[in-house]
Every structure is written in C-alpha cells, then in structure tokens.
Image (cartoon, rainbow, N blue to C red):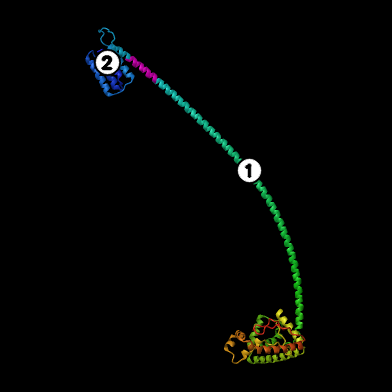
Amino acid sequence: MFTAIGLSTARCLRLRVTGAVGVRNASRLAALAPSSRVASALVLRGLATTRALKTEANADAIANAGTAAAAAAAEEPAATPAKKPTKAAVAAEKAAEKAKKAKAAEKAKQVAAAEKAKKAAAAKKAMEVAAAKAKKAKEAAAEKSKKAKEAAAEKAQKAKEAAAEKAKRVAAVKKAKEAAAAARAQKAKEAEKAKKAKAKELAQKQKEKLAHNAARTKQASKSQELVGLKAAAMIASEPKKLPEQPWVLFISRKVHLLKGKWSREVMGGLVAEYKALPASDREEMIAICNQNKLTNKAALNAWVQSFAPIEIYKANAARKRLRNTYNVRISLLKDDRLPKHPLYPYIRFSIARYLQENAPAKVKEGGPAAVGAEWKALGPEERQPFIDEYERDRAQYVKDVRAVLGRSVRPRHPKHALNPPEESSGDE
C-alpha cells in the first residue's frame, strides 16, 4: 500500500497540477487511502483524472498533497507496529523537502524579482526624475536663451530705434538747413525779381512817358498839320452852301425856334410834321432847293475862279490828305483850268465797248471781267489805236502841267505797261 502511495505521490510530483479541483481530489484520495489495492487504484484514478484535466499546479499544491499523504499514513491504528520507513516515504519526504526548497527558492526568486522590480522602479523613477530635471534644466536653459535673445533683440531694436532717431534728427537738421537755404535763395530770387520788376516798371513808366510825350508831340504835330491842312484846303473861306434838300431846308427853318433843344422826341415831332406837310409846300421847297443848287454852284465856281489854278491844286491835295488820313468828310474843288489826266488805253477800250450799240450782251452783263477778257484777247495791232490816243493826250497833259502848275510830270515806271487792264498811273 505504501509503495503504491509513494509511486502515486512521485507521479503527482512529476505532474504540473494546477487548479483547485485536482488538488482537492489528490488530498481526498491520500486521506482516505485504505491498506489495499483499492486505495492505490483510487489514487491512480485521481491522478489520471488530474492529468486528464491538463492543469498546472504550483509547488505549494504538490507539497500540500505530500504532507496530507504523510499525515494519513501517520494516523493509522497504533496497534500497527512501527516499521522502517520505506523508500517511497523517504522519496516523499525528499520530494516534500525539495518542494519546500523549491517553494523557498520560488519565494526567494519572487523576493528577488520584487526587489529587482523595486530597484527597476526606483531606477525608472530616478531616470524619470533625472529626465524631468534634465527637461527642466533644458527648459530653463531654453527660457534663459529665449530671454537672452529677447534682451539682445530688444537691445538691437533700441539701438536701431536710437540710430533711426539720430538719422531722423540729422535729416531734420539737414532739411531745416536746406529749407533755410531755399528760403534765402527764394528771398534773394524774389528780391531780384522785385528789383527787376521795379526796374521794368520804371523802364515801362519811362517808356510810357516817352510814348506819351511822343504821342503828345505827334498829336500836337497832327493838330498843327490838321490846322495847316484845313488852312491849305481853304475850308474857312469856302462859300456856305444853301440847303439843297427839302428836309434840310425844313430843319433850317426850325433851328431858330428850337434854340438848341435837340432830343429824340423833338426830332420825332419834326419828322412827323415834315411828313404831314401838304404837297404844295413840298413842291415849293423842292423848287427852292433846285434854285439853291444853281446858286451854290455859281457861288462856288466864282470863288474857285478867284484863285489861281495852282492854289486850287494845292487845296485839293490838302483835302485829299484830310479825307484819307483824318477821315474828314470833304469834297474836292472842281476847276476846269486844272490839267486832266489822260485815260489809259484799257479804259478807253472799255468805254468804247460799253457805248457801242452793237456791244455783245455778255459784255454788258459780264461787266469788267468780260471787257478784260476781250482786251486780253486783242492783238498788238488792235490795241495800237487806243495806245496812240493815250500817248497824244499824255503829251498834252505834260505840257498843261508844266504851263499851269509849273512843274514837270514824273517819268513813267518801266513796270507800268499799257496793255494789261490792271495797269495804274505811275507818272502823276
């Protein structure tokens, strides 16, 4: 029986029994083992059942099983005499001791593992603390570097701002100097301009004064010339004309009644009164005006004949200048004693063409243009009669001028031809 139990125990030690069911079955079999083959069979069956479960047990379960088997063997009846321990018991004891040692070793191993784990945790914690310190130191260094960079940047910014402010002050001083120089230059320029303007104004005033004096002199000269021309024109000694128009005669009769009170209303009343005159009064006034024309002509002719032809010639020259230069409305004096300038060949041809009864209608309708075209179309032989008449009259004109006016006629300029209709007098 002990042999079977020992074998079963040894087999159980070789098994890796785990789980509460296997341990309880093995302990129950060891406690109830009888001194027979049945006990061994039950033990073997329990072991087989435990093997069939394929569980793993720790060293404590195996030791507990051996201890329980030894206690069951010790509880046998006392009547059985003590015997020498068998090999199985010894082996079981050895197995129990081995299991105990294994448990102690496992416990030592667990303690060592725990110590190792504790040391590892401590080392890890130390490493974490060191890493935290390193991180903190790194952060502190970074912060210090950041602060140093910020301080350097701030210092650089301040230096830059100081340099900018200095440059700004220098630029402001330079600008102020330039502005002052520009102001001085502008002031000098304005002074020079004012000086030139003043000089120009003085020169202008002097020029105006000179122009005014010249104008006054010219005006005085013109006034003197005008007075001399009027004296030479014999305007003052010319006979006063009687009214030659009915309206002028009507107004001349009303002058003594108006006594210088001329106005638009007065003239309107005179016009209305003149228009309201009966036909007999108008006919009478027309007859008086016609008689006045004859009287004026006779008086003017007698007055002209009272002067020498040269005096009448000079009076007409003065009257021409008064009319052309001073716009004086005055007529020339007619004197049959004065030499008459001969008509040019073209004028003679024109008069002949217009006076002809068989003159073409185009000549009368076309006017000077048509006559000029015909004159240009004439040949030298056709023009010669008109030229001969002109030369004959011109020779007589030269003699009359020398005899009456006591001067010679200027020779004709070569450019004045007799053929073209545009020719003009260049000899008188």
Callout 2: 10 Å neighbours few (<14), some, many (20+)?
Answer: some
Q: Residue at x 41, y 22 (%)?
A: 114
Q: Where does the magenta region start and end?
A: 95-109
Above or below for 354 versus 9: below
| Local SS, label 2 | helix
Q: Residue at x 28, y 21 (%)?
A: 22
Residue 75: x percent and y percent? 27, 11
Residue 141: x percent and y percent? 54, 32
Q: Quadrant of the N terminus?
A: top left
Q: What's the residue type where badge 1 is placed?
A: Ala
Q: Main secondary structure of the magenta part?
A: helix
Report the residue marked by disc 1: 163
Above or below for 179 versus 89: below
73 relative to 127 in the view: left or right: left
- In this orientation, which residue lies closer to the viewer: 218 or 413? 413
To which quarter of the image does residue 404 belong?
A: bottom right
Q: What's the residue type where badge 2 is placed?
A: Leu
Callout 1: 10 Å neighbours few (<14), some, many (20+)?
Answer: few
| For marks 1 and 2 on the same chain, the one whose residue lies earlier in the sequence | 2
Residue 104: in magenta span: yes
Q: Are marks 1 and 2 in contact (CB under 8 Å)?
A: no
Residue 118: x percent and y percent? 43, 23
To which quarter of the image does residue 54 belong?
A: top left
Q: Quadrant of the C terminus?
A: bottom right
One can see residue 309 in this view: no
One can see residue 380 in this view: yes
| Local SS, label 1 | helix
- In this orientation, which residue lies closer to the viewer: 311 or 129? 311
Report the residue marked by disc 2: 7
